[in-house]
Image (spheres, rainbow, N blue to C red):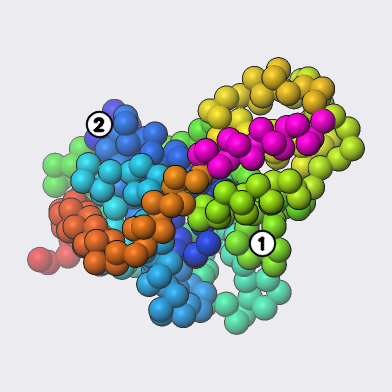
Amino acid sequence: MSEFHERVFSGVQPTGNLHLGNYLGAITKFVSLQKTHECIYCVVDLHAITVPQDPLELQANTREVTAAFIAAGIDPHKQIIFNQSQVAEHAELAWIFNCVARIGWLNRMTQFKEKAGKDRENASIGLYAYPALMAADILIYRATHVPVGEDQKQHLELARDIAQKFNNDFSESIARNGFGGAYFPLPEPLIQGPATRVMSLRDGSKKMSKSDPSDNSRLNISDSAELIAQKIRKAKTDPEPLPSETAGLAKRPEADNLVGIYAALAEQSREEVLARFGGANFSTFKSALVDLSVEKLGPIGAEMKRLQGDNVYLDQVLRDGAGRARVIAAENMGQVKQILGFVR
């Protein structure tokens, strides 16, 4: 990996209603990574259309994610923020990867089975093949690191398999064209810090999700201070006080979730949180969690709303980012075509 320039790539789907899970699981990591890495952050609108989308909602949701990136602290001048569909090389490399990846590999992808459900014959080809597009998203920039949640690790492993197979299949051409022993890096996952998986406020066994019919199951980044307080106070708990050690959270999913949220927002470990709150009842702990959540999320939500009132600015950020991304992607795509033997 040392021969490759270190670069971070990550994409977020424009699904609307960004919530605490998106913030803690992804966006805060993006903000911290920009201090140490060259970063490319993508709103993956091509992935979004693997399921039906309302065009106007897709536009609004793309701008919402862009606003969230900036409001949370990602600098669009120093890092690249863009939407995937503006850089055609993503789709172009995805087709090549469709010819590299094996059907057996895609058949093992558990997310397709979950999203397609029992009516798999009626699912789109895009939903089935989108892990190859995800691999292209990463590798068109020859990214070395990808911040991912546990649910995306399988797709990153597929990206590594595709990169390895391409490097092996075309090893002679890669060497002949002067690209060294391997063209694509094998991207590494970055899974950082506590609460990478934030659970529902109503059911600690289920992931926090925008698709949950109950809005009380999640904290939306755009929620007001009053709404944040109301949702946390209504969050499901159990009758026991908080334990003093993390082992005491093992069979208490709701308690574990709230402690994990506090730890992530406070940038502390679960052990540090329990050292302070162990033995306390949930009303005391929830009050502290309300104060912390409002302190951390309130300014971001306010700035998001301000930015979402300026579509001209958000669209310009995406265009500028796409232009900078395209420079990298076009150079790499040209080299891939050279390796494959396409006449240019």
Give the residue drawn at x 62%, y 54%: 227
Q: Could you tell me how far apart the alpha carbons at marks 2 and 1 are, in whole angstroms? A: 47 Å
Give the residue drawn at x 28%, y 43%: 75
Specify whether residue 88 is in view: yes
Provide the residue designation for mark 1: 215
Specify whether residue 271 is in view: no
Q: Residues within 10 Å of mark 1 (few under 14, many from 20)?
A: some
The C terminus is located in which quarter?
bottom left
Give the residue drawn at x 53%, y 28%: 267
Q: Quadrant of residue 216?
A: bottom right
Residue 3 has which mark?
A: 2
Residue span colored magenta = 281-296
Q: Residues within 10 Å of mark 2 (few under 14, many from 20)?
A: few
Which three-letter amino acid code belongs to the residue tagged 1? Answer: Asp
The image position of residue 250, as x and y in percent, is 80, 32
Give the left or right position of residue 80, taking residue 176 as reference. right
Question: Residue 146 colored magenta?
Answer: no
Q: Residue lying farthest right?
A: 239
Q: Is residue 53 above or below residue 19?
A: below
Q: Residue lying farthest top?
A: 275
Which three-letter amino acid code belongs to the residue tagged 2? Answer: Glu
The image position of residue 212, as x and y in percent, is 68, 63
The image position of residue 91, as x and y in percent, is 32, 67
Callout 2: helix, strand or loop?
Answer: loop
Question: Residue 291 colored magenta?
Answer: yes
The N terminus is located in which quarter?
top left
Callout 1: helix, strand or loop?
Answer: helix
